[in-house]
Amino acid sequence: MCGIIAYLGTRPAKEVLLAGLAKLEYRGYDSAGLCFSDKNGLLSFKAVGPVKNLVKTIEGNDKYSLGIAHTRWATHGEPSEINAHPHFDCQHKIAIVHNGIIENHNALKEMLIKEGHKFVSATDSEVIAHLIEKFDEGNLESAFIKAINLLQGSFAVVAIQAGSRRLLATRRSSPLIIGVGKEEFFIASDVPAVLAYTNQVIYLQDNDFVSIDDSGYKIKTLAGKEIKRELEGVQMNLEEIEKGGFKHFMLKEIMEQPITLAQTIAGRVVNDKIKISLQIIPGSFDRIVMAACGTSWHSALIGKYLIEEIAGVRVEVDYASEFRYRQPLISSRDIFLAISQSGETADTLAALREAKAGGAQTAALVNIVGSTLAREVDSGIYLHAGPEIGVASTKAFSSQIAGLLIFALYLRQLSGASLDKGLLMELKNLPKAVEAVLAGADKIASLAQQFKKTNNFLFLGRGLNFPVALEGALKLKEISYIHAEGYPAAEIKHGPIALIDEDMPVLFIATKNLLSDKILSNMAEVKARQGKIIAVVDRDFQDIAALADHLLVVPSVHPLLAPIINNIPLQLLAYYIADARGLDVDRPRNLAKSVTVE
Ligand code: M6R
């Protein structure tokens, strides 16, 4: 988490840094800060809260053309001005910004304090500035490298020194890119931060060390060996990362799902065949092991149903954070599939490395092109859902399910079995069905008004609709702060039914599948205890209408596509409830879009 942007060039650094920070706020927004440098020294500004609070503190100061900036998601030390980055050495001559966690900061801090260094913040990051100061004998590069070599953990760091026109940076397990313009250079956590100025970027790799001055950039290993990294032209355009007239990114991203799903599917279903370029040899695997976090983990659960039913291949799903530490039994007969929107989630990357070490073949379903995950797997499927800025994942989830369906069909095709042409046709028509659901957004907005004051919510589904229930509950709780639980509908009688009374709204995902009749009995059990029922249904189902207080009708689609369709009313309900509660939907409290710490 945390977003970094640094600039060295000819424009006012203030403009570049503040615009860059605004694009990086999805990575954290509990405080922000920046530091300019010129021959007279360093000048810094900090503010608690989102970047707009920082903007207010900086009047003028347009003369600086070099600076570093940071937007924070707190790990060590509460959100406060003192803990906001940049951090400094004792002399206030060195400034650093850091993303990640320095795991050995306590030991380093103790050593530095004994040597006379004075710390002002409660962060792990501040040790970096003091270490550089400790080693500085007139050569900043060498001091920087010595300091970095003492760090354990994950980090992307940029440092500057008073009076020097130079940016120094490195990364380990936290993303960092260089943007290259005409006579100007940028360093950032992610491409959108520099896209207004250049689309020419270099994706730095672990332990790359970069030194930039007005004459250009040099990339070396931390051992000092010069290396070449490819300058790549990125495809993303600026419009894709603007709100485009919507009140929030989340609403924009929900509404663009017909397009983003079409992008995920495009070119992958051709003449009733699946065309993807995964490096998987038929007969070379016995099972698929998937690991992911949050919403991506819910996609993986849906993937298990899809792959086992369509391809007849055994699937196991783990939380990445559990997988990485539980000594999983992995072999070369496993395909490890990591699922991630960002491709930078620390636990998912660690799980991937664990699976690789066990000899598994590796693949990823990932949205961000060029992300660490995309680079580390043997092969993968890009979602092509475009940048997702809202912290709550919406369009990426739909694209992940579509991607998993394509993956399941591909595995079936590999085995030589024929594909269901009806399903392929419906998959291609899916964007139209999604449009039809979105057309009902106003009805869901008025329903949200009735539930905006509730304190609890239950989401229930069976079969493929069970992970949809989990996802509906996650979406509601993360942006509205309403306590919500997802359960397999049949499980409620083993405990959660005790919660049901007239104040407990229960959302059933009750579209037609093999378990439709059974879910009716579960609904009756809730109704008998005065629970308020909202039901997502796909037909004129009299029995449900008699039990439900509110019906959300979605188009009938193939049952294997239903999770995508059924999830959309849940996304809209969560969005409209959070908005009706007056909350900052795109920046829910305590969260960040990209969780690059464990
Ligand atoms: O980028 P990833 O898909 O790896 O992120 C995983 C989770 O952090 C993410 O899905 C999170 O749960 C979202 N806030 C859900 O809306």
Image (cartoon, rainbow, N blue to C red):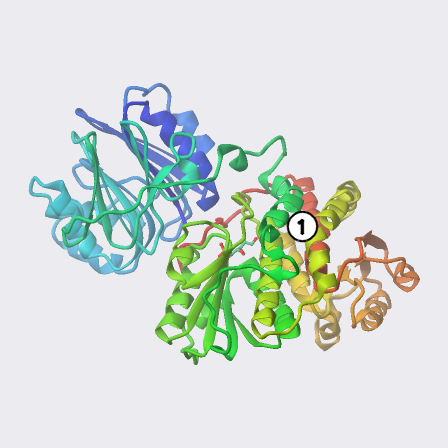
Residue sitting at the far left:
137
**In the figure, is residue 377 to the left or right of 168?**
right
Say which of 355 and 321 sits in front.
355
Image coordinates for residue 340, horizontal then vertical, percent = 50, 57
Image coordinates for residue 440, horizontal then vertical, percent = 78, 44
Residue 362 in view of the camera: yes
Q: Residues within 10 Å of mark 1 (few under 14, many from 20)?
A: many
Image coordinates for residue 549, horizontal then vertical, percent = 86, 55
**In the figure, is residue 419 to the left or right of 230?**
right
Check the image and report above or below for 446 versus 346.
above
Residue sitting at the far front:
271
Residue at label 1?
571
* Beta carbon of the mark 1 residue lies under 8 A of ligand 1: no
Image quarter for residue 586? top right
Check the image and report above or below for 402 versus 48.
below
Image coordinates for residue 194, horizontal then vertical, percent = 39, 35
Say which of 271 and 332 sits in front.
271
Instruction: Give the quarter of the figure containing the C terminus.
Output: bottom left
* Residue shown at 41% from the left, 62% from the top: 377
Say which of 359 and 580 sits in front.
359
Check the image and report above or below for 72 versus 458.
above
Mark 1: amino acid: Gln
Label 1: element kind:
helix
Say which of 379 and 463 sits in front.
379
* Residue shown at 19% from the left, 46% from the top: 130
* Residue shown at 38% from the left, 75% from the top: 359
Check the image and report above or below for 278 versus 415.
above
Image quarter for residue 197? top left
Give the tally of numbered discs.
1
**In the figure, is residue 95 to the left or right of 359?**
left
Residue 48 in view of the camera: no
